[in-house]
Amino acid sequence: MNARLAALFIVLMGAVVGLQALHETSGGPPASTTANMLYVRSPEAMTRFALSYDALLADLYWIRAVQHYGRTKLSSDPNKQYDLLYPLLDLTTSLDPRFNVAYAFGSIFLAEPPPGGPGRPDLAVALLEKGLRAQPLKWEFAQSIGFVHYWWRQNYDEAAAWFARAAAFPNAPSWMGPLAATTLAQGGRRESSRMLWRQVARDAEGEWFRNEAVRRLWQLDAMDEIDRLRRVLALFQRSVGRPASGWEDLRRAGYLRGTPVDPTGAPYRLQSGIVSLDPASPLNPLPTEPARLR
């Protein structure tokens, strides 16, 4: 392929990705019928088309995946659809099987529950397993699969099994073994979750992952504080004989010094006797957990 033909090929392939981006943002046919459509869906076909430009096309499709996820997450549509996310990530990692960022970030995007993501931990695991097939010595992928099972599926036996598998890799860090044992013994407890996210905050590659770990730790702190506030509300009701109508009741009675706020500074909401995060708090939504393991 001469240089002119190669350049034309890149322009055409870029146009495919660009057309998809334009299609999603333009006033074209209804989203329900056409917005969730890729012009090239087959990773095998795209890999054949790419010739020696697979890394460049992988970058283009990765950018499209991030744009699709971010645009959908921030949209006001009550029925957010992330239908293109996995196909775009699949194309990206087929074009460049060693695109580690796409596996790592993509799995988090896929696993995030609605409305912040598609709520597809199964696809997150599938993407990471694909990465592990491409790079059999990448212990981080096995660890990440364990995280998906732990945090989003609450399947602690499966999480512990994957942490143990990651620990068996020849280049795995020494803390992976104890992590597997702790998960098996205490999986689902907040302190166990804290241990996992502290490890990520300390050792993760990339600022985004460290910031995400800090956010998860703040979520756990908020859950502890909500439990404490519920106990305070119960004490107030037993003492006064009625439920508190707001935080001011608790301040006047001496149970609180001020309006309680979450780790981001957003005030907790007290409505009809129920304590929750403020809807505007960036810690929403809090993870679910088995009540008996708090």
Image: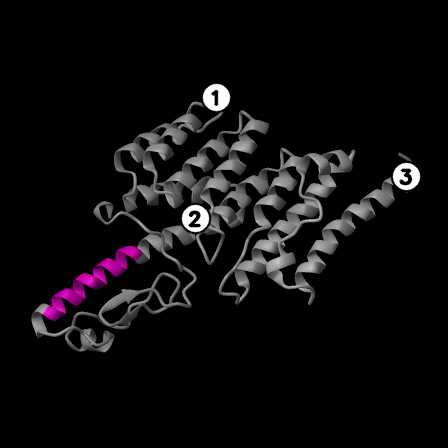
Label 1 residue SS = loop
Tell me the distance, in whole angstroms, between the alpha carbons under discs 2 and 3. 46 Å
Label 2 residue SS = helix
| Residue at image coords 29%, 32% | 184
Numbered circle sitting on residue 105:
none
User: Percent x, y for residue 159?
Assistant: 37, 35
Q: What span is colored magenta in the figure? A: 223-237
Numbered circle sitting on residue 3:
3
* Residue under label 2: 213
* Residue under label 1: 170
Tell me the distance, in whole angstroms, between the alpha carbons under discs 1 and 2. 26 Å
Q: Is residue 22 magenta?
A: no
| Residue at image coords 27%, 71% | 270
Query: Which quadrant of the rendered structure holds the N terminus?
Result: top right
- Badge 2 crowding class, 10 Å Cα cut-off, few under 14, some 14 to 19, many 20 or more, is many
Indicate which disc, 3 or 1, sits on the residue closer to the N terminus: 3
Task: Give the quadrant of residue 253.
Answer: bottom left
Task: Give the quadrant of residue 158.
Answer: top left
Can residue 176 be seen in the rendering of this structure?
A: no
Tell me the distance, in whole angstroms, between the alpha carbons under discs 3 and 1. 44 Å
